[in-house]
Amino acid sequence: MKAEDLLEIIKSRRSIRRYKSLPVEEEKLRLILEAARWAPSAGNLQPWHFLIVRDKRLREMLAEAAYGQTWMVEAPVHIVVLADPERSGYRYGDRGRALYCIQDTALAIQNIMLMAHALGLGTCFVGAFDERSVSKILCIPKGLRPVAIITIGYPAESPEPRPRRPLDDIVSRESFC
Ligand SMILES: Cc1cc2nc3c(=O)[nH]c(=O)nc-3n(C[C@H](O)[C@H](O)[C@H](O)COP(=O)(O)O)c2cc1C
């Protein structure tokens, strides 16, 4: 694959909040999870777990736990991404628990979103939700922390790109001294 093709995939991805009422094929979901599995992680500890939710009642409850983001229900699949802080903490202490496991799951999530997009699917990273409610709804084992709900489905909208800050504003060279 050419580098420009990858950049095109990265730049054309959008957060999708309207979905067609079409199911997501199990084979596509498998490819998406395969992409997640190949994300890098601190010490290669892979401190993540992916909970696939297709059940409509559960999706409704998740949308409610996400402070009433009712559009989420339209997405036929939710992937609840769970971090396992102790898996990272066991080797790296507090830095592993508070930072590495979150960074690792974020990388897996980006792989999920880009792979889904490359397969013609839309996604949205939902981070605004009540963690305790989500854990309760899904009976998430103690020790696993829900860090994101990724909605997935066939897009029923094609939003304009959201603006990005210019490179000059966000890049410095050598040091701030
Ligand atoms: C950590 C994080 C949390 C987010 N939480 C939400 C959310 O709760 N609801 C939502 O609709 N979008 C959420 N988003 C999506 C952002 O609004 C979106 O990525 C941003 O506006 C840029 O738009 P784009 O993804 O289409 O480029 C979240 C994104 C990130 C990275």
Image: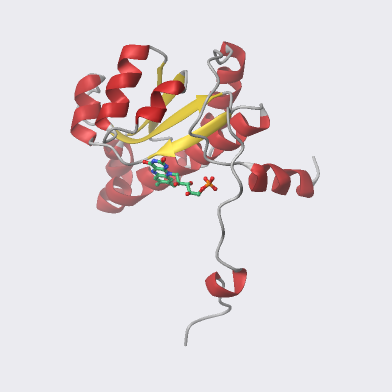
Q: Quadrant of ligand 1?
A: top left
**Residue at the image position 26 percent from the left and 36 percent from the top:** 67
- Give the residue at x 55% y 52%: 162
Q: Is residue 3 left or right of residue 165?
A: right
Q: Residue 76: x percent and y percent?
A: 47, 18
The quarter holding residue 105 reads top left
Asked which colour scheme the image uses, the reply is: secondary structure
- Asked if residue 70 is positioned above or below residue 101 in the image, the reply reads above
The quadrant holding residue 57 is top left
In the rendered image, residue 16, in percent from the top left (x then y), is placed at 52, 35
Q: Quadrant of the N terminus?
A: top right
* Residue farthest toward the bottom in the current orientation of the protein: 177
Left or right: 124 as drawn, with respect to 134: right
Residue 117, position as x, y percentages in the image: 62, 33
Left or right of 150, for residue 6:
right
Percent position of residue 120, x then y = 66, 27
**Residue 56 versus residue 51: which sits nearer the camera?**
56
